[in-house]
Each structure stands twice: as structure tokens, then as C-alpha cells.
Image: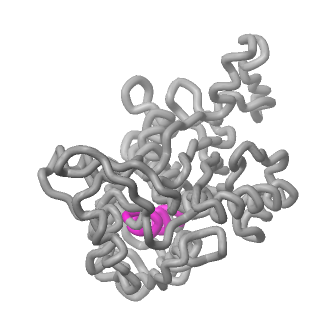
Amino acid sequence: MSSSFGRLFVITTFGESHGGGVGVVVDGMPPGIAVDPAAIQRELDRRRPGQSALTTQRKEADAIEILSGVFEGMTLGTPIAMMVRNTDQRSQDYDALKDVFRPGHADYSYWQKYGVRDHRGGGRSSGRETVGRVAAGALARLALATVGVQVLGGTVRVAGVEAARRDWDETEKNPVRCPDAAAAVDMAKAIEAARDAKDSVGGVVEVVARGVPAGWGDPTMNKLDALLGAAMLSIPATKGVEIGGGFAMCERHGSETNDVFDGARYLTNFNGGISGGISNGAELVVRVAVRPATSIGKPQSAATKEGGTTEIAIEGRHDPCICPRVVPVAEAMMAITLMDAWLRQRALRGREA
């Protein structure tokens, strides 16, 4: 199984949703970077369950343990291992699903690939795997901040309700993590309605990176937009990625979407900060399509190992909309991708940025 991402800044996540814990090993973190465990914990708190009535009520503190690679608050340049122990598993909620392939889940495909699967909460296909990504992303953020790079994100669409504004200071002020306070109210109502109906809704998460200099990324096979696409699509429940103007550019003319550079800045940003696979100095803009959560309480038809179907209603504690908790994960994957691109550019040109 591929659990690693990156070339010079490599993260490898481990653990299952209902195992002893989940975590990550980060290799390639430069030495001498100040690490504040509280900064890592703050990102994990944004991802953890039980944040509001709009998320799963599984109660996990997600307390981070830094096991290696950091001494007296500084990175050593050696692998950094971090772990979060699971404390609120209710594996019995999944006993009835041991021989059932849940609709929309990876149960059947995992079983066909490995011949065995962990039916408790989905094992490695669970969203709980993303704990390690967020912890690694927090480290990447700390390093990127030393060269002035900042990553921000928010929910910009839920069940047809779209954000009209991008006030990134607003995202942590509402449970949907929407950068538009007015839209956040309607998004919350849509999520609550789905929850009350024992159903779920999807949406779109937008992530931006500020301060990325021109020159990061590579042409052809390792384009920065291709790497960001792979990073975002590796997040559970994501089904689409667009950069800059994205699919909406298909309805426009080239004269409308060719970004104009005045020698100091870009006047438009349809390319989302990437030209020819390389960052161009403009703000990076990535949007991620997040499907409705597959674990719902509404009765559904499901296949069984013995053949045929049965009707199930998935018990347990689940998110009626995953978007609010995908935001910190998408931000983390953006930071991890940019961290790797920065190190590769530094190796190529021999300079910090």
C-alpha cells in the first residue's frame, strides 16, 4: 500500500481508525527549524471530531506525541515521528458490517485487493488517516513561514450554497469554516437538514497559498499543478480538483483568460498562480470537490460476502458534511506539496527561495 507522499519532503502515514493510534513519519525536514508543539496541536484541533453539532460526535482529544527528530524545540534534520492515540473507538458499532460491503465505501475494493480488511470504521480508508497528514502539514507550515509562505482555506460551497466573499479571517468563526459569514448560515442549515434526515451533503473546499515565489515546480511530468492535484485527490472523499479558473474557463475565450503580467504583478489569476507547471508568483488557488459522506443512517441496499444484498443503516458517529474537517487537511496537503517543491528548487538553484 502506498502511504508515502513527496520526494525530498516525504511523509508516511500509519495506523487505522480503530487501532491503537494513527500518525506520521516525516523525512526531509531541514534542521534548525523551531517547532512549537502547540502549533501542531492547533491544526489537529481544527481537524478533530466533535468540534460542533455539524461534525461526528466521536470524542478524540487527538493529543500529539512527538517521538523523534526534535530536540529542545528544534528540528534535528532526522526523521520526525508523531503519533496520536485512539481513545474513543466504538468498534462494536461495526460488528454487523463484518460481512457486508457498505455502499459508497472502499470495503469491496480493499477486500478484492488484499483478501482481508479491517471492517472497523474503514481501517486505512477512514478519514482518521488524515491525522498524520495534518501533523506533517503543520511542520511544513512552520518551515514555509520562514520564507514568507502562508496557506489558507475554507468551505466555499455546500449543497448548492456558494460563498460570494473570501474573508479568510472569517473561516474559524463559524462551524462550516466558510469565508463568507452570510453563506455560512445557509450552509449550516443545509448540513443540519441532511443530518436530521440521516443523510449527508457534499461541497467544495478552496485552498490558497500566499507568498509563493515564482519558480517552484517543474515542467512536463512533475508540474506543480499535477502534484497539487495528486495531493488533493489523495484525501479521502475528494472527487475533483480545479486550479485557478478551472472548469469555468471552458466557457470563456482565450482573450478573457490569458493572465496579464505588468512586470510587477498579475492583473488576473485564471491560472491560479501556476504557468507551465511552475509557480509564477501570483496567489496559488486550488478548489477540491468533496463528495457527501458515505456513512449515513438512512437504510440502503448493500452487498454481502456470501452474495446477494441486504438492507443496512450504518450505525456509529459520522459527519453529515465532511467539508469543515477537510479544510485543514487540504491546507496540510498544500503545505506538504509546497514544502517539497521548495526543497527541490533549493537543491536546483542553491538558494532559499
- Please state which of residues 89 and 221 is positioned toward the viewer in this rendering: 89
Task: State the image coordinates of residue 113 (x, y, percent, origin top left).
Answer: 17, 45
- Relative to 215, is 294 above or below? below
Query: Viewer-proximal residue, 20 or 84?
Result: 20
At horizontal 26% and vertical 47% (from top left) the residue drawn is 108
Q: Magenta stretch mostly in which secondary structure?
A: helix
Residue 85 x, y percent position in the rendering? 34, 82
Q: How many numbered marks, from 0 up?
A: 0
Q: Which residues are magenta?
A: 129-141
As drawn, 65 above or below 240: below
174 relative to 208 in the view: left or right: right
Q: Is residue 61 left or right of residue 266?
A: left
Q: Is residue 137 magenta?
A: yes
> Which residue lies at the image location 35% right of the left edge and 66% below the top edge?
121
Q: Is residue 136 visible?
A: no
Task: Give coordinates of residue 33: x percent, y percent.
Answer: 45, 72
In this rendering, does residue 268 appear at all? yes
On whether residue 110 falls in the magenta region, the answer is no
Front residue of this view, candidates 212 and 81: 81
The image's colour scheme reads one colour
Q: Position of residue 208 (x, y in %)?
A: 65, 48
Vertical order, 221 against 353 (above or below): above
Dividing the picture into quadrants, the one containing residue 248 is: top right
Q: Residue at x 48, y 85 (%)?
A: 61
Residue furthest right in the image: 182
> Which residue is depicted at the point 31% across and 74% down?
18
Horizontal relation, residue 194 to residue 67: left or right: right
